[in-house]
Amino acid sequence: MNIENRYERGLAKLREIDGAAGQRVLDSLEDIAPDFARYLIEFPFGDVYSRPGLDLKSREIAVVAALTALGNAASQLKVHIQGALNVGVSRTELVEIIMQMAVYAGFPAALNGLAAAKEVFAQEREPDAVLSHTA
């Protein structure tokens, strides 16, 4: 597989899911770890997200659940909550996904996830709001 094709495919997929928030993540890495930014594009988005087995809505549901369960990835969770909204996951579905994680990851993780969702939902209503998070 051509490296540039992986990168171009990944960048297109990142933009499709995360829009400007994805570019801000890349920009935040430019002065400290530009190679890491490339890895972030090529592997997760160029290789995994671009596979045909799941649609983007299903992939983002899985990512929101996983990041909620981790309990220590609030910045990334916010980016992926916005990405989930961008690909058709509703606010109600997101709240239910995060609440479901209380069963498997505990109430603190679910509470943190709900706080992240609340913040994203509030920013979504503000037209000039900017999510400034890392991947």
Image (cartoon, helix red, strand yellow):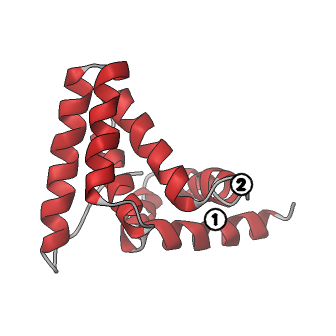
Looking at the picture, tell me which residue is in the foreground, 122 or 74. 122
User: Of helix, strand and loop, which one carries label 1?
Assistant: helix
* Residue depicted at 59% across the width and 68% down the height: 13
* Residue depicted at 32% across the width and 60% down the height: 90
The quadrant of the rendering that contains the N terminus is bottom right
* Residue that numbered label 1 is attached to: 10
Q: Is residue 24 visible?
A: yes
Local crowd at mark 2 within 10 Å, few (<14), some, or many (≥20)?
Answer: some
Number of numbered tags placed on the structure image: 2
User: Of helix, strand and loop, which one carries label 2?
Assistant: helix
Task: Reply above or below: 111 against 43.
Answer: above
The location of residue 51, given as percent across then percent down, is: 72, 56
Asked whether the residues under the numbered discs 1 and 2 touch, taking CB atoms below 8 Å apart as contact, a structural biologist would say: yes
Q: Give the numbered dot on residue 47.
A: 2
Q: Amino acid at mark 1?
A: Gly
The location of residue 86, given as percent across then percent down, is: 39, 69
Q: Is residue 112 left or right of residue 57?
A: left
Q: Amino acid at mark 2?
A: Asp
User: Quadrant of the rendered structure where residue 74 is?
Assistant: top left
